Image: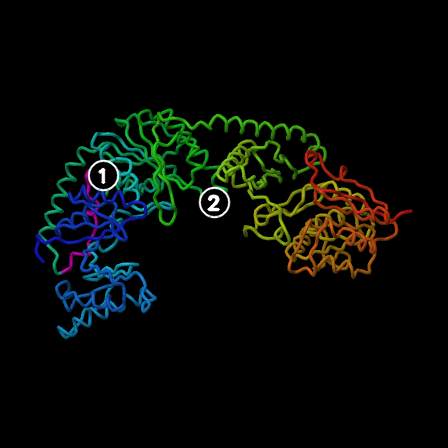
Amino acid sequence: MSSTQTYRFWVTCPQGVHGLLKQEIEQITGITAGDWHKGVVFEGPLVDGYRVCLWSRLANRIYLALHEVEEVSYSALEAMVKRVEWDQHLRPSGTLKVTFTGHLPEIRDTRFGAQKVKDWVVDQFRDKHGMRPSVDKSADLTIFAQVAKKKMFLGIELTGESLHKRGYRQSTGPAPIKENLAAALLLANDWPAKARRGEAFLDLMCGSGTIVVEAAMIAADYAPGLGRGKFGFERWLQHSVNDWRLLQEDARNRRTVGIESMPPVLGYDADGGVIASANETLQKLGLEKQARCYHKSLDEWTLPTHWELKPGLWLSNPPYGERLGDKPTLMRTYRKIGDIAREQLAGWDLAMLTSDDILAREIGLKPKQKRTFFNGPLETVLYNFSAEGDRLAEGQAVNEQITAFKNRIEKNLKQLKKWRNKDGIEAFRVYDADIPEYAIAVDQYADWLHVQEYAPPKSVPEQKAQQRLFHAIDALSELFDIPVKRIAVKRRERQKGSNQYEKNAATNQSFIVHEYGVKLKVNLLDYLDTGLFLDHRSSRHWVQKNAAGKRVLNLFCYTGSFTSHAFVGGAKKTVSVDLSKTYLNWAKDNLELNGGKEGPNHQFIHADCLKWLADCRDSFDLIVMDPPTFSNSARMSETLDVQRDHEMLITNAMKSLSASGVLLFSNNYRKFFMDEKIYELFDVKDVSNLSIGPDYKRKKPHRCFEIRFKG
């Protein structure tokens, strides 16, 4: 091949970087780049392909094109491969590797595709030379073949490993971003021009320092390919050793000049371990004179006085908080970003990469620009701000709403304080959608909080609802002095059938709360419910006070809290029935916590309560029945609708009640009304008001009745 020959080069890059890569190639080569199936294409002499390998901060891989055909078929692929004189690129005694992407009717697997291309290549060598190259992962030549929808491509990989591997990375902190994505963020913020003007760079959450290192290399005019051990083209038969040597010499000279004139590039992080690693990298690259990382958190940070800093760019990749529970804590971090910018960085530009617009809005500044990038598979957005930029108009309104929310919580706590202290209550409702903007229920369980979000109306955008939820959690953490990790957060919707028993996760973080001398196990994280219905607290206390010497039946027993109260109250016998083995085991645990044990006097029965009750022939002095509003569990013989079926439930339960006994019947269907037939047959007393504690008086969550035989 002639050194003046024009070649076609295909260049791949991370998703979202395509436009920046086209600009970069033009700046490196002076050649206008175009669009290619997987990235960017340009044409020029071989030396320009080398230049892009050496200087591109954005590319992943660069291929030298051999053929590109529009016929997409197995026979066309074979012909395209066989058309190349492969001994012009590789010695018969050399090594090769094939990368293949795409599918054909005859090629369903990329490994099979690579195998076929390899076979056609080595067969050509065997026919011409009587010997063939061998396959090796660290090959002299890597062949690239790709089948797309409308074209097929065949070329030689020039880069070897992906160009994002600069050769400087040693150890890293958690979740680092790739080097070429870091460079893309810097180029998107015009950092090269800022550096040439002597403006400084800051990353106040630098982690292992990838963005800091890339910023320093750009500021020092340091070619990213200088630190790589090898490139794919170096054992290619048509490699121009002299052209490559001259390019490297020029890059080293530019680096020497650039380091002397580069502005300060500074990074900070709360993790001292990753800071040490970042500084080792900067020293290894010879950039430590003007580039340095320091162990300092956002809360401790102030504008340094020992560096002369011309206002420039602050760019960070702060945590995104992919888990729901992380985001309220991170909101404080993002608010701190805005505070630092407004108070200390006048004249600076800011850029933050995050996957969450809610977090970005906490900065409190109106973005000048938003640009989408992909951090691996995760779609993220780069937000650009000016420290003196316009503030978001919603900030004041949000502050007023949060203040009102906190005031209401404090008012509720004050009203409940005397009652809680008198009765020693550890688990109670604090708040229940008292303010329309914060449609959540908040319960305190000892030193934990349990937050249930009501599904927002369709008129409230999902993002706005989430933002309010995160603000509320943040406020609760501050108000109760409880870390966010001890605030369990759940979306609360009407549950049907067995959904109320479904698991959310498997943390097994159970703990004990005390209620009128009874110990009860709760788990706020693993299930939609917690194991303890707080609105039935007064009813449980009533059972405890009336259970002495009684035979007690607990139907739909859930975790057996009524059973434990009955045992502590001196019940002679207890029988607990439920369809869930999980909750029956929980009920046994609760009984053991209070000194009881499963046996003839304390039975736990795994059964469909409807069927078991219809067949029951035993007699009980006190029956507790709190059925679900609706259930269609596959394990039940029939569906259950409490409004429709309560007459049957009560009538069957009364068959098992002793003459002087009482049935405590309750349910949480707010529109429930007792059938007149029940009033005609039995002595019915509505005790709903008595069964609801002070923490639930604002919203009456259940109906409760004492039912006895007449006379």
330 left or right of 54 in image? right
Amino acid beneath label 2: Arg
Q: Nearer the viewer, residue 414 or 20?
A: 20
Secondary element under disc 2, as helix, strand or loop, is loop
Q: Which quadrant is home to the N terminus?
A: bottom left
Amino acid beneath label 1: Ile
* Mark 2 neighbour class, 10 Å CA radius: few under 14, some 14 to 19, many 20 or more: few
187 left or right of 335 in image? left
Q: Earlier in the sequence, mark 1 or mark 2?
A: 1
Residue at image mark 1: 218
Residue found at x 16% / y 56%: 234
520 left or right of 67 in image? right
* Residue 49 on image: x %, y %: 16, 50
| Residue farthest along the right direction in this orientation | 711
* Residue 678 on image: x %, y %: 82, 48
Q: Give yes or no for residue 216 being in the magenta stretch.
A: no
Q: Nearer the viewer, residue 274 or 119?
A: 119
Q: Which of 111 and 227 is in front in this view?
A: 111
* Mark 1 neighbour class, 10 Å CA radius: few under 14, some 14 to 19, many 20 or more: many
> Magenta region: which residues?
219-236
Q: Where is residue 75, by image quadrant? A: bottom left
Secondary element under disc 1, as helix, strand or loop, is helix
* Residue 562 on image: x %, y %: 73, 48
Residue found at x 32% / y 69%: 106
Q: Nearer the viewer, residue 332 or 586?
A: 332
Q: Would you place residue 651 above or below residue 482 in this image?
A: below
* Residue 306 on image: x %, y %: 28, 27
Label disc, if present, on residue 323 of the rendered structure: 2
Report the Cα–Cα distance between label 1 and label 2: 34 Å
